[in-house]
Image (spheres, rainbow, N blue to C red):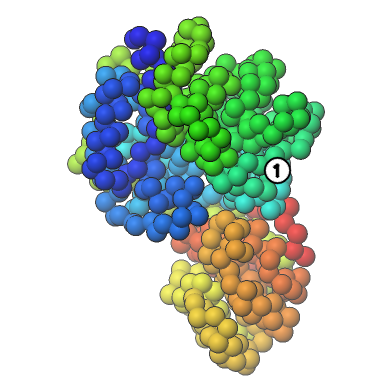
């Protein structure tokens, strides 16, 4: 390859599974003309995180999976150099593609006891097999961020938790699972995005820690990853003034973070990839097209993810970079392509006629995880209380944000028959009616299906619902099962008055079934909340 063609390998522009034919052809032109190294797949333009504020509606497409395979085949067919296909699939392809297997969030896995970390390996392995099935070689996961800020708007449920050793161990298990089936992984977001309260998709978070503090906490999982030769490390769009002479320079554009800290001090010589270059924390810094790409490369990134100015970026790097630096980055990406088995005529394309994932294996794995991560927050003889109330005809079940036709209620119904109620929408007037109907019951089994995993707008739990729950907790014997992000516990009023609280993390059918079995049989809860949640 010429120097210019080698530079093209550093560019991984974004592509969208549900895009127009015009956009698809534009990507094919990029592949043909600029010898780009890879692509990063997203569901659609509306789904990209930086589009939140545009309020664009994501249009679902049940054919996304087949379309993804067809696009991969199409894009590879017009590439002179095989493309390294990448995606951010932290909890599986379902994060981007409809009707594909979904696995638990990292925070759910973080609730597992240490002696069950092999289940994290299995998640990595299964995600790897699913990616391989569609022709993807590189998962931009897992997070190695320690979630040590409960108000973090973007990490939270995506982190394995607050314990640095557990985060390090579980992140390694996840990437080892992927590696063992031939899929590359990535530790992110260096030097640690956990202790931030700004979403870097939309603004620049600033870490106030000193280098010593980072080494003692945030950097621990990354150091362990480096010791275990992780395939790649993603640099986060976050500023660490202590490492930049007091300046708020994004780590993605900082030689002192990448070259000095990561390369020299920590001894990492693997692939360094930037976080998405379209994120507003960096994308608006330079007026000149290609300048951002050059600055990111010059700071030490080998791969420019979601690069928006490919042609101009290549020219800026060609004009400014030393040939030996270009060669060093090229060798790192080539080594990854060799490990992924896509060079030397070994590239295999997805089978377009194959349509079935191994959903049965996914379900069995999710059930094992549910049985081992279920977490008892509070228990005043929950099982005894509900059976006693049932015998007195004084028991009711209420489902919040899911109708009564749910697995949790179905599993309970034979052993604990009782009136069932639900609230899905309608606000204060509907809740008042519901409150009146519940007046005749002394004991309630409440299932709260938290609407959103992100904390924005109180996880989309309405204020009227929070008030309603707060009233029930102080006036009734309430056994509360929370299916969703445990940080939602912090916003429920009067939670200390609950008779029992069980944290379930996900609303998958396997988790609902496990929750019901636990209540009926009073089985031991093996999980622990992987982060500090202040609610009692």
x then y, percent, for residue 154: 59, 48
Residues 442 and 466: in front is: 466
The quadrant where residue 75 appears = top left
Residue 339 visible in this rendered orientation of the protein: no
Residue 46 visible in this rendered orientation of the protein: yes
Q: As displayed, is residue 162 above or below residue 173?
A: below
Q: As displayed, is residue 407 above or below residue 464?
A: above
Q: As displayed, is residue 374 above or below residue 135?
A: below
- Which residue ends up furthest to the top in the rendered image? 324
Q: Residue at x 49, y 47 (%)?
A: 50
- Within-10-Å neighbours for mark 1: few <14, some 14–19, many 20+: many
Residues 188 and 500: in front is: 188
The quadrant where residue 460 appears = bottom right
Q: Residue at x 26, y 29 (%)?
A: 29
Query: Looking at the rendering, in which quadrant would you find the N terminus?
Result: top left
What residue would you read off at disc 1? 195
- Which residue ends up furthest to the front in the rendered image? 287
Q: Residue at x 38, y 20 (%)?
A: 8
The quadrant where residue 243 appears = top right
Q: Residue at x 55, y 87 (%)?
A: 429
x then y, percent, for residue 383: 65, 73
Query: Looking at the rendering, in which quadrant would you find the C terminus?
Result: bottom right
x then y, percent, for residue 137: 39, 30
Secondary element at image label 1? loop
């Amino acid at each position: 390859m010429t120097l210019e063609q080698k530079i093209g390998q550093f560019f991984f522009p974004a592509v969208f599974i549900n895009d127009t034919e015009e956009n698809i052809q534009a990507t094919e032109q990029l592949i043909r003309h600029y010898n780009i190294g890879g692509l990063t797949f997203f569901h659609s333009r509306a789904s990209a995180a930086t589009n939140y504020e545009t309020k664009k509606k994501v249009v679902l497409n049940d054919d996304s999976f087949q379309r993804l395979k067809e696009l991969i085949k199409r894009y590879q067919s017009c590439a002179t150099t095989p493309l390294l296909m990448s995606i951010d699939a932290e909890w599986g392809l379902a994060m981007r593609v409809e009707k594909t297997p979904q696995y638990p969030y990292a925070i759910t896995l973080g609730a597992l006891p240490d002696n069950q970390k092999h289940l994290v390996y299995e998640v990595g392995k299964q995600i790897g097999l699913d990616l391989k099935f569609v022709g993807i070689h590189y998962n931009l996961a897992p997070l190695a961020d320690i979630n040590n800020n409960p108000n973090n708007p973007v990490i939270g449920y995506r982190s394995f938790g607050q314990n640095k050793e557990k985060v390090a161990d579980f992140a390694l298990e996840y990437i080892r699972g992927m590696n063992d089936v031939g899929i590359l992984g990535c530790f992110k977001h260096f030097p640690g995005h956990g202790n931030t309260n700004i979403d870097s998709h939309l603004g620049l978070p600033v870490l106030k820690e000193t280098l010593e503090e980072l080494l003692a906490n945030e950097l621990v999982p990354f150091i362990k990853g480096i010791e275990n030769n992780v395939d790649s490390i993603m640099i986060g769009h976050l500023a660490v003034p202590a490492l930049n002479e007091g300046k708020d320079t994004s780590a993605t554009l900082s030689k002192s973070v990448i070259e000095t800290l990561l390369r020299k001090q920590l001894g990492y010589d693997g692939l360094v990839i930037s976080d998405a270059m379209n994120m507003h924390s960096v994308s608006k810094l330079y007026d000149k097209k290609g300048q951002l790409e050059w600055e990111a490369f010059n700071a030490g990134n080998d791969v420019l993810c979601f690069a928006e100015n490919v042609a101009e970026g290549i020219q800026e790097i060609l004009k400014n970079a030393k040939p030996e630096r270009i060669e060093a980055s090229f060798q790192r990406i080539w080594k990854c392509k060799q490990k992924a088995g896509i060079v030397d005529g070994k590239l295999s394309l997805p089978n377009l006629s194959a349509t079935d994932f191994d959903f049965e294996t996914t379900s069995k794995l999710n059930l094992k995880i549910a049985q081992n991560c279920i977490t008892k927050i509070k228990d005043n003889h929950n099982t005894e209380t509900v059976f006693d109330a049932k015998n007195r005809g004084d028991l009711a079940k209420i489902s919040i944000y899911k109708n009564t036709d749910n697995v949790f209620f179905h599993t309970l119904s034979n052993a604990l028959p009782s009136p069932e109620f639900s609230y899905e929408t309608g606000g204060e007037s509907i809740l008042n009616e519901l409150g009146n109907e519940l007046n005749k019951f002394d004991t309630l089994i409440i299932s709260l299906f938290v609407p959103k995993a992100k904390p924005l707008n109180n996880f989309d739990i309405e204020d009227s619902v929070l008030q309603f729950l707060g009233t029930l907790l102080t006036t009734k014997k309430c056994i509360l099962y929370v299916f969703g992000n445990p940080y939602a516990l912090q916003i429920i009023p009067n939670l200390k008055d609950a008779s029992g609280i069980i944290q379930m993390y996900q609303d998958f059918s396997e988790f609902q079934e496990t929750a019901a079995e636990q209540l009926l049989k009073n089985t031991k809860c093996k999980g622990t909340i992987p982060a500090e949640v202040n609610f009692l």
